[in-house]
Amino acid sequence: MFLLGLYAGRRGIFHDPPGHRKLLRRVMWTTLPLAVALNLYYAYGPQIFGSLYQNTPDWGTGLIYTFAGPMGSLFYISALLLLLTRGERWMRRLGFLRWVGRMPLTNYLMQSIIGTLIYYHYGLGLMTRIGYLPGLGVTMAVFALQIPLSRWWLSRFRFGPVERLWRTLTYAKPQPMRIARLKPAEST
């Protein structure tokens, strides 16, 4: 996924989505059926496919799992970029994503910690007691909380806390965290 992101960045896809509409449409319509099929097979395989699923070797199920998530991610990314090419109205509608997008590593790690506390045995242990749709609801609720939290944080600080650590390690010196506030003009 990192290499695909590097490729997309070098091709200028993120900086010029309108110039890449054809490619984005192709990616979106190719990955959508793959993502749906792979995720359905992985999530509901025993119920839908019965013995075919039961006879799938472990490496096959692992391979399906390995590709299901990235196919969904590529679909979402291409669909969002296409929406952003539709004009200012969609830019405003999707503007809330910028806050979460400016601190992605912090939000990813926060989701991981919250998720493990909800699903794993050292937390609530809901892994086997909650279905996929309620799990999706929990995921959406966590993300919905991260939006105002990210906005609040970024109104006070330049980066997310983990992004600051990452930049500090990258540049080998502490990075300024607080946003410089302008002092009121002195009256003369």
Image: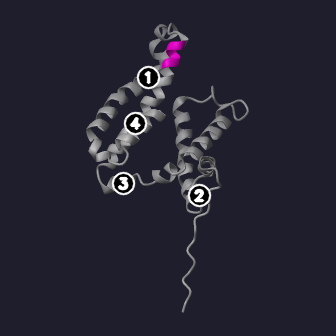
Q: Residue at x 38, y 41 (%)?
A: 10
Query: Tag on residue 38?
Result: 1
Q: Earlier in the sequence, mark 2 or mark 3?
A: 3
Q: Earlier in the sequence, mark 2 or mark 4?
A: 4
Mark 2 in CB contact with mark 4 (< 8 angstroms): no
Kind of residue sitting beneath label 3: Met
Q: Nearer the viewer, mark 2 or mark 1?
A: 2
Mark 2 in CB contact with mark 3 (< 8 angstroms): no
Kind of residue sitting beneath label 2: Trp
The one of 63 and 96 positioned closer to us in this rendering: 63
Q: Label 3's element?
A: helix
Residue carrying label 3:
91
In the displayed structure, would residue 45 be above or below residue 11?
above
The one of 131 and 31 positioned closer to us in this rendering: 31
In-image side of 119 versus 50 (left or right): right
Mark 2 in CB contact with mark 1 (< 8 angstroms): no
Which colour style is shown? one colour
Label 4: few (<14), some (14–19) or many (≥20) C-alpha neighbours in 10 Å: few
Q: In 3D space, how far apart are the residues under numbered discs 2 and 4 (Cα atoms)?
A: 31 Å
Span highlighted in magenta in the image: 59-63
